Amino acid sequence: MSIGGSFQKTIQEIISRVPESKIEIDADRPAQLRSLSSAASWKAAGVSGALSIPGGPFFLVTILPDLALVWRIQAQLVADIARVQGRTDQLSSEILLYCLFKQGDLGLSDIVVRVGERYLVKRARGGVLQRLIERVGVRVLRRWIGKRAAAIIPLIGAAAVARYSRKDTLEVAETAIHLFSRPWILEDEEGQKEPL
C-alpha cells in the first residue's frame, strides 16, 4: 500500500468511529470550550514534537503515526465541543471529516456549506464520502510532508512541527465551535431537508 493509501485508510478509520464524549458540562460554556481547545492543542503539539525529535530521514517514518495520533486528539476535541454545545446527536463521520480538514481548503463543500447564518449539512451519498477521503488524503500528505521537512533538523524541526500541530488543532476547534453554535439544515441521502 502506498503512503497516500495509508493516509486515506487512517482518515477512514478515524472518522468511521465517532468518539464518545464523557466530559461534564460546565456552567461557563465559553470558558470550557477555550479550555478544551487549549488542552487538546498542547497535547497535539506534545505528540508531534516528540515524534519529530529523531529528525533526519526518520521524519518520514513518523509522519503517519504523528498524524494518526493528532487526528484522534482532534476528533475527541470535536466530540467534546459537540457535547458542550448540546449537539452530540448531530455528530457524524461527515461532520468529523469537515471539522478535521476544513482549514486545509480541501474542497469539503460537498458535505457542509454555509448559507447565511445557517449551515447546509449533506449526508454523503454513495461514494461521495470515500472520494472526499481520497482527495483529503492526497492533499494532507503533500501539505504535511512540506511542513515536516523542517524535522530534518532535530529539535528546531521538532519545535516547528509541534507549533504547526498546535495551530492546526486550534483551527479544528474554531471550526467545530463555529459549526456547532449555528443552526443547520440537514439534507439526507434522498435530498430531503430538515432544520436542526
Image (tube, rainbow, N blue to C red):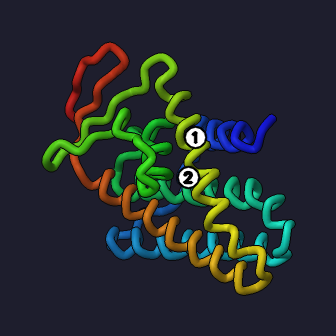
Q: Quadrant of the C terminus?
A: top left
Q: Nearer the viewer, residue 192 or 79?
A: 192
Mark 1 packing: few (<14 Cα in 10 Å), some, or many (20+)? many
Marks 2/1: CA–CA distance: 8 Å
Q: Which amino acid type corresponds to the residue marked 1 in the rendered image?
A: Ile
Left or right: where does residue 3 sit relative to residue 100?
right
Residue wearing tag 1: 15
- Asked if residue 177 shows in the view, the reply is yes
Residue at image location 65% in from the left, 74% down from the top: 161
Quick check: 183 above or below 16? below
Please rate how many residues cluster around mark 2, counting C-alpha atoms within 10 Å: few if below 14, some from 14 to 19, many from 20. many
Return the residue nearer the eye: 130 or 41.
Answer: 130
In the image, residue 3 lies at what x, y percent? Answer: 75, 44
| Quadrant assignment, res 4 | top right
Residue 128 horizontal side relative to residue 138, left or right: left
Q: Are marks 2 and 1 in contact (CB under 8 Å)?
A: yes
Q: Quadrant of the N terminus?
A: top right
